[in-house]
Image (spheres, grey):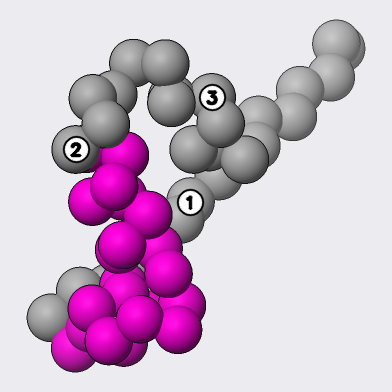
């Protein structure tokens, strides 16, 4: 989903590199790399009026 949103902002070489890295079957894909940790975080704020 992210790739489709940023495709117009990247060069064709950058898109090819991105495709290569996110390919889960490829030997250089990010899911197979031992030197990379993918983390995500979301913050939720909840408030209520007194």
4 magenta-colored: no
Q: Quadrant of residue 42?
A: top right
Q: Label 1: few (<14), some or many (≥20) within 10 Å?
A: few
Q: Label 2: few (<14), some or many (≥20) within 10 Å?
A: few
Q: Is residue 40 left or right of residue 5?
A: left
Mark 1 to mark 3: distance in Å? Answer: 20 Å
Q: Quadrant of residue 39?
A: bottom left
Q: Which residue does the image show at 34% across and 16% down from the upper left?
A: 9
Do we see residue 10 in this rendering? yes
Q: Which residue is mark 2?
A: 13
Q: How many numbered circles does the render carry?
A: 3
- Magenta residues span 14-34
Q: Quadrant of residue 8?
A: top left
Sequence-first disc among 2 and 3: 3
- Asked if 46 appears above or below 23 in the picture, the reply is above
Check residue 41 in the rendering and tell me which mark sits there, or answer none. 1
Q: Secondary structure at mark 1?
A: loop
Mark 1 to mark 2: distance in Å? Answer: 29 Å
- Asked if 43 appears above or below 39 in the picture, the reply is above
Q: Which residue is mark 3?
A: 5
Q: Which residue does the image show at 19% across and 88% down from the upper left?
A: 34
Q: Which residue does the image show at 43% across and 25% down from the upper left?
A: 6
């Amino acid at each position: 989903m992210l790739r489709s949103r940023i495709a117009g902002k990247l060069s064709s070489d950058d898109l090819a590199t991105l495709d290569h890295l996110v390919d889960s079957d490829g030997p250089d894909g990010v899911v197979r790399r031992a030197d990379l940790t993918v983390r995500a975080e979301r913050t939720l704020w909840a408030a209520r009026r007194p």
